Amino acid sequence: AQSVTQLDSHVSVSEGTPVLLRCNYSSSYSPSLFWYVQHPNKGLQLLLKYTSAATLVKGINGFEAEFKKSETSFHLTKPSAHMSDAAEYFCVVSDKGGGSYIPTFGRGTSLIVHP
Amino acid sequence: DAEITQSPRHKITETGRQVTLACHQTWNHNNMFWYRQDLGHGLRLIHYSYGVQDTNKGEVSDGYSVSRSNTEDLPLTLESAASSQTSVYFCASSRGQGAGQETQYFGPGTRLLVL
């Protein structure tokens, strides 16, 4: 069965410093991996996704993530945090386990950005 | 523009009452999903549908039901509301052609309080 672990429930950074949100996954198949962002009182929006093409994936708002099969990781990074990046971030894995593709969400990481 | 809407956005009900949450998408997507979001749990899948007349149980389906009579709508019914069903509910849709690699599009959410 697929699973996903977001290693930090909260990450706090200063504006202008790098962001690292960590995600490890477990999958018996070739997974698709996603990062979604949720701003306060909003629905979720796709940041980026990995679907077995390039291992370094670029997303919106300067975010990127690298798929590392050997480490079963898909960490999200951004070189310089902006105040508007403060939000909840979800890592998601989807594979063909059980014969159908059902996304599994991590528990989320809250990114706090200090001025 | 295509969109996915949920109604009501906020709902207060009493224990034992039947409640229906509406979800409507104009993307013409085949797949639709219902999730609940609770602190510390991320998003958990309640029910999902791959097309008209198709419904499937997710991880936390007890006490919930759905029906899919057309492409656009997937209403979620709480048969007899319980306090444990107090949560934020999100509907999502995806195209249904990309087998696990697809982006999900989320509605704005419904906040349900069961007293």
Image (cartoon, helix red, strand yellow):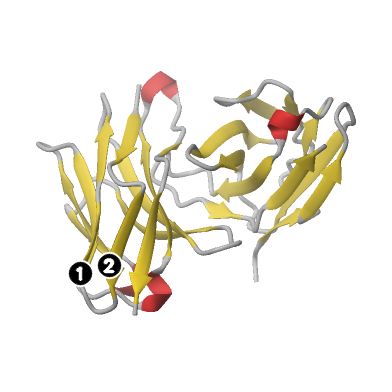
Residue placed most toward the observer, A10 or A2: A10
Q: Position of residue A99 (x, y in %)?
A: 43, 22
Q: Position of residue B105 (x, y in %)?
A: 55, 55
| Above or below, B67 relative to A37 | above
Specify the quadrant that holds the N terminus of chain A: top left
Q: Secondary structure at mark 1?
A: loop
Circle 1 Cα neighbour tier, 10 Å, few/some/many (<14 / 14–19 / ≥20): few
Kind of residue at badge 2: Val
Specify the quadrant that holds the C terminus of chain A: bottom left
Q: Is residue A57 visible?
A: yes
Chain bearing tag 1 is A
Quarter of the image for residue A64 reads bottom left
Whether residues under marks 2 and 1 lie with C-beta atoms below 8 angstroms apart, the answer is yes
Quarter of the image for residue B25 reads bottom right
Q: Can you identify the residue that label 2 sits on? A: A13
Quarter of the image for residue B87 reads top right
Q: Secondary structure at mark 2?
A: strand
The structure residue drawn at horizontal position 69% and vertical position 29%, both measured from the top left corner, is B84
Discs 2, 1: same chain: yes
Q: Can you identify the residue that label 1 sits on? A: A18
Circle 2 Cα neighbour tier, 10 Å, few/some/many (<14 / 14–19 / ≥20): some
